[in-house]
Image (cartoon, rainbow, N blue to C red):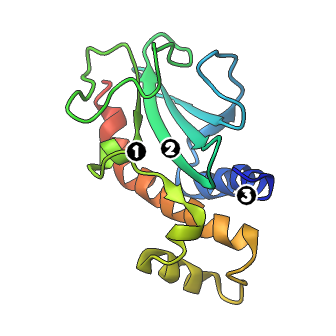
Amino acid sequence: MRSEYGNALRKIFAAELSQRLPQFKPTKVASDTLWAGERAFSFQSPHATQWLVLVPSQKDDCFTVELGWSKLNRFPQVMSRPSHHSGSMPTAETPECMCRIGVIAGTGDFWWHIDRFMRAPEAQAIFAELGGALQSNANTRVQVCARAAVGVVASNAQAFLASAA
């Protein structure tokens, strides 16, 4: 991801997340499974530490989000991320997992491609809410995508993460 998008994405996504899902706090993670540029957010529930990870692409101007949990009170130490794919969703017996939001939402492995997403009707509706922002501005483009992504997370996270109980 280009640095102008990457820097804006990390700041704007955290701000959008704090408004919609304030229980998730930025969390420093020392893990071999977290790549450069990724940002982790966590929330301690009664049954597990719940995780949300912002995953910017290393090559393209796009990103996705992963959700998961660890009943071992750490960042999930899974063999690979995501650890579960469509058709193999984790259950309450799963001690640790990470899943992509698209799989959780039933849309497959979904990535928000910043420039392409701006042409989508959903993006245009979000852009209209911003009032007066320039669509050509990198921060505006990222904000539209981040708001859409956090909306999908907010709509799907509670039920998925509750399955850890």
Task: Give the amino acid type for the residue marked by disc 1 in the picture.
Answer: Ile
Spatial separation of the CA atoms under disc 3 and disc 1: 21 Å
Q: Nearer the viewer, mark 3 or mark 1?
A: 3
Q: What residue lies at 50% left-to-right and 44% top-to-bottom?
A: 65
Whole-percent x, y for residue 108 in the image: 31, 47
Q: What residue lies at 58% left-to-right and 60% top-to-bottom?
A: 146
- Binning the other alpha carbons within 10 Å of mark 1 as few (below 14), some (14 to 19) or many (20 upward) gives many
Q: Which type of secondary structure does the marked residue at label 3 adopt? A: helix
Q: Earlier in the sequence, mark 2 or mark 1?
A: 2
Q: Are marks 2 and 1 in contact (CB under 8 Å)?
A: yes
Kindly identify which numbered label has been placed on residue 65.
Answer: 2
Residue at the spot of label 1: 101
Residue at the spot of label 3: 5
- Binning the other alpha carbons within 10 Å of mark 3 as few (below 14), some (14 to 19) or many (20 upward) gives some
Which residue lies most toward the left here? 87
Q: Which type of secondary structure does the marked residue at label 1 adopt? A: helix
Whole-percent x, y for residue 165 in the image: 30, 24
Q: Earlier in the sequence, mark 2 or mark 3?
A: 3
